[in-house]
Image (spheres, grey):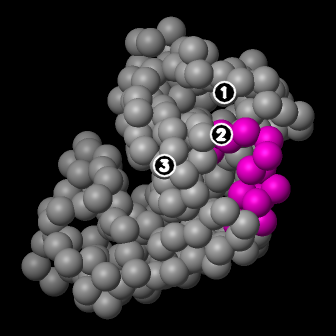
């Protein structure tokens, strides 16, 4: 676990001295998925988030096009440099994976921050539940599914899920705990047979890393903030930028602020 504050971690990321995935970093603080796009698509994307709150729980968006800060979530934030790794898409195709996006920045860009499952991992650990990707020090496994999202304007696609293996009793406890955190995906959307949601090989995630599933455990699946990347790719925007899966923006907002009771 990192002992850095979110601000210190963002400063290291900006300086290029931290470029790993952020699972388990700055415990106690909200991590966020990122989507950046030209203003002409922002209204459609905002509607897509409202239609699909499980995979796309919106935390914040730019106050004005071209703004690089979000003071309500993070001090001295520069959205162009403070994420460890970004993906750049053009016409729906990945064209670059970079550590800062100053070279790609446009004055009409609107940024969206979406809740991340890393935030509820702390609550699960505090209750004594193991988070296998943290134990094994790898990125959480993420999978494309056949669960359809509600389309909005140019955006459509299937839900992406993250997975954490647990014993059935622990899975039920995880449902209870995560129901308190709807702004970071809330309760799992499925547990048990991966094929029921279109996952053919649990050992081959589409994003992130595979983790060990022990005898007696079941895979537990949460809606994932990588979902917008699928929708963005399907929309074939002229340009769009996202975080690389698992490489999140770490905010100054305490996870406790997102608990509903």
Q: Which residue is mark 2?
A: 36
What is the span of residues highlighted in magenta in the rendered image? 34-48
Q: Contact (CB < 8 A) between labels 1 and 3?
A: no
User: Quick check: can you spot residue 225?
Assistant: no
Q: Contact (CB < 8 A) between labels 1 and 2?
A: yes
**Closer to us: mark 1 or mark 2?**
2
Q: Which residue is mark 3?
A: 92
Kindly indicate the quadrant of the structure image that contains residue 58: bottom right
Q: Which residue is mark 1?
A: 79
Instruction: Work out whether residue 95 or residue 118 is closer to the camera in this orientation and state it.
Output: 95
Secondary structure category for the residue under label 2: strand
Distance of mark 2 from mark 3, alpha carbons?
13 Å
Q: Is residue 56 left or right of residue 166?
A: right
Q: Is residue 124 above or below residue 198?
A: above
Q: Mark 2 or mark 1, which is nearer the start of the sequence?
A: 2
Q: Mark 3 or mark 2, which is nearer the start of the sequence?
A: 2
Q: Is residue 126 left or right of residue 104?
A: left
Kindly indicate the quadrant of the structure image that contains residue 68: top right
Q: Is residue 79 above or below residue 175?
A: above
Q: Residue at x 63, y 55 (%)?
A: 115
The C terminus - image quarter: bottom right
Secondary structure category for the residue under label 3: loop
Q: Is residue 119 left or right of residue 132?
A: right
Q: Is residue 168 above or below residue 154?
A: below
Which disc number belongs to residue 101? Answer: none
């Amino acid at each position: 676990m990192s002992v850095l504050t979110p601000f210190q971690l963002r400063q290291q990321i900006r300086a290029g001295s931290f470029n790993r995935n952020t699972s388990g970093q700055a415990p106690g603080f909200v991590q966020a998925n990122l989507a950046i796009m030209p203003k002409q698509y922002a209204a459609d994307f905002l509607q897509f988030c409202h239609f699909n709150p499980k995979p796309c729980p919106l935390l914040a968006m730019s106050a004005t096009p071209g703004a690089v800060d979000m003071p309500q979530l993070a001090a001295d934030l520069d959205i162009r440099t403070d994420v460890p790794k970004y993906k750049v898409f053009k016409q729906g195709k990945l064209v670059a994976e970079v550590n800062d996006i100053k070279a790609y920045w446009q004055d009409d860009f609107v940024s969206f921050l979406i809740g991340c499952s890393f935030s509820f991992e702390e609550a699960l650990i505090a209750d004594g539940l193991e988070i296998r990707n943290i134990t094994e020090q790898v990125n959480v496994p993420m999978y494309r599914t056949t669960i359809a999202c509600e389309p909005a304007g140019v955006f459509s696609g299937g839900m992406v899920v993250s997975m954490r293996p647990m014993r059935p009793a622990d899975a039920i406890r995880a449902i209870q705990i995560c129901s308190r955190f709807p702004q970071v995906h809330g309760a799992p959307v499925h547990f048990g047979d991966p094929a029921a949601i279109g996952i053919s090989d649990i050992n081959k995630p589409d994003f992130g890393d595979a983790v060990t599933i022990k005898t007696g455990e079941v895979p537990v699946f949460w809606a994932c903030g990588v979902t917008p990347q699928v929708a963005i790719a399907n929309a074939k925007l002229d340009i769009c930028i996202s975080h690389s899966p698992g490489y999140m923006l770490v905010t100054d907002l305490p996870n406790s602020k997102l608990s509903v009771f």
